[in-house]
Amino acid sequence: MKPEDEQADPGLLDLGTATTGTERSMATSIGEKDPESFTLVIIGASGDLTERKIVPALFDLYRKGEIPAPFRVVGCARTHLDDQGFREKMRKALGKKTRSSDAEWKAFAERLHYWSIDYSDESSFVALGTFLNSGVQGQGMAQNRIFYLAIPPSLCELTVGMIGRSGLAAEGTEGYGWSRIVIEKPFGRDLKSAAALDRSLHEHFNEHQIFRMDHYLAKETVQNILMFRFANAIFEPIWNRRYVDSVTIRALETLGVEHRAGYYEQAGVLRDMFQNHMMQLLALMAMDPPSAFEADRVRDEKVRVYRSLRPFPVGRLNDYLILGQYGPGVVRGKEVPGYREEPGVRPTSLIPTFASMRVFIDNWRWQGTPFYLTSGKRMGEKVTNITIQFKEVPHSVFRNVLGEHIAVNCLTMGIYPDERISLMFQTKHPGPRVSLTPVTMDFRYAQGQEDALMEAYEKLLLDCMLGDQMLFLRQDSVELCWSFLTPILNACETCSDRSEMLLFYESGTLDAEAVERLNRTRMVGI
Ligand code: BG6
């Protein structure tokens, strides 16, 4: 019996999985190695990122046997806690995951430690260093460290300085191994502040030690974009302005701002989603093939895309950009407040929670092809996907018998919730008359794959342990994305009719289709 959604779609040609049986065992795996022994120091361990993402991802990696060497996790924050208190807090946060595997949890929990820290006191970091040096001998532990900054952006520069000045960034001296720092977005709030943050990082760390995190890059379906494009010979020849009419990249969410108003009121959707996730997806779709699948070769190609971005026509913002803010409404049957009624949000806030923009890439491959980027909170559906709309047939041989418009081919790369790739094309509708039916050829990741998809945080933590920067951002791309967005942000934030620019939408009403209609009515020339 097939799952319900497959039965419901008569036009679905099921391809199943691309690799089966012995083929699968021969599947090419890239970069297989084990991480060395390390200590992960989570700075800001009392915050919810540690509970929601970092520790659960580590525990899963541990359970899967992905961290075979001895390791320690040291949670640091201002809160006073002891090891036991920290372990208990993490156990509660993991919820059901721990109950099913008590023995594993106990063994994992023994590796969790806690150390209170004062962010503004250098001696507190020196003491942390002494603590990190202790208890390493005799346990097979090497002096390798990862400092994970799980703190608000306002504390990052200060903390980086403290880590550096107390000697914790040093590598290869007096028995130390490597030292790495993981930093979460946002990397600054504009070009100037991003450069300043980078200068602080580089005062103490070298580029190979810095891991700028963008969790979108580690989603399996996002990683697959390069495999799909460059491990198959048939797509690349049509991946250009000659065959592609437009590319749409959307990340729609049903969630609102949740408890993050403090941050979001400073950020808004352009800094929160576009500067990083959306621009990264754009680069993966538009870049040229790198000469090799190596971190810097791949990142070089992304940078070339950013360098080719056509400067945004800030004098004609409304023709290329739609900004919106959610009002009250109903999402998944539940009444939700508007953005301005959310705790911590100013009642007159003009911060956009939705944006849709059209960008162009001025190079030979993409000249004249629009890329639509859309992201918003409290939308009608949670969906992240990329659609490539191909051009119409150049000449319809059926024009005399068909009487209907031939819908164009579409390739959709589903990132969430449908992790799939679908190609829509036309077929003959069965029967005596000439008529067309669009059908979908479909590949679903989950179907028939032996290996469970790896969660983004697991993959990023693992890569950081391995020192692989492929899925982390390089500073030049961060700065180029800011160079593109900063003029837009300035124009939006200083324009006299700022509130008129903002579309106030009812929560739960804008789904992908509604956004498309909106683009067509508001942006010129579509
Ligand atoms: C984060 C943003 O980076 O990505 C959030 O700060 C957003 O505002 C989230 O909700 C979306 O991530 P995902 O993986 O749910 O699409």
Image (cartoon, grey):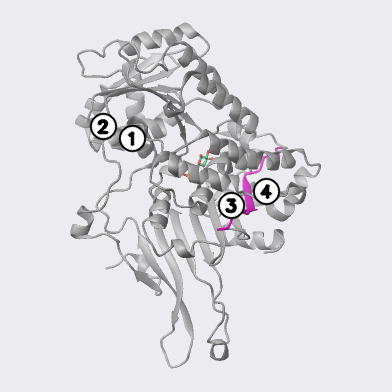
Disc 1 to disc 4, C-alpha distance: 37 Å
C-alpha span from label 2 to label 4: 44 Å
Of all residues, the one furthest to the right in this rendering is 496
Asked if the residues shown at circle 1 and circle 2 are in contact, with their CB atoms under 8 angstroms apart, the answer is yes
How crowded is the residue under tag 1: few (<14 C-alpha within 10 Å), some, or many (20+)? some
- Work out which quarter of the rendered image holds the C terminus and state it: bottom right
Q: Residue at x 30, y 23 (%)?
A: 38
Q: Which residues are magenta?
A: 349-365
Q: Disc 3 and disc 1: Cα gap in Å?
A: 30 Å
* Label annotation for residue 462: 1
Which residue is at the far top?
A: 123
Q: How many marks?
A: 4
Q: Quadrant of the N terminus?
A: bottom left
Residue type at mark 3?
A: Thr
Mark toward the start of the polypeptide (1 vs 4): 4
Mark 4: amino acid? Leu
| Disc 3 target residue | 374
Instruction: Report the magenta stretch's main SS.
Output: loop
The reply to whether the C-beta atoms of the residues labelled 3 and 2 are less than 8 Å apart is: no
Kindly identify which residue carries mark 4.
Answer: 323
For the residues labelled 1 and 2, the Cα–Cα distance comes to 8 Å
* Disc 3 secondary structure class: strand
Q: Secondary structure at mark 2?
A: loop
Q: Could you tell me which secondary element the residue under label 4 belongs to?
A: strand
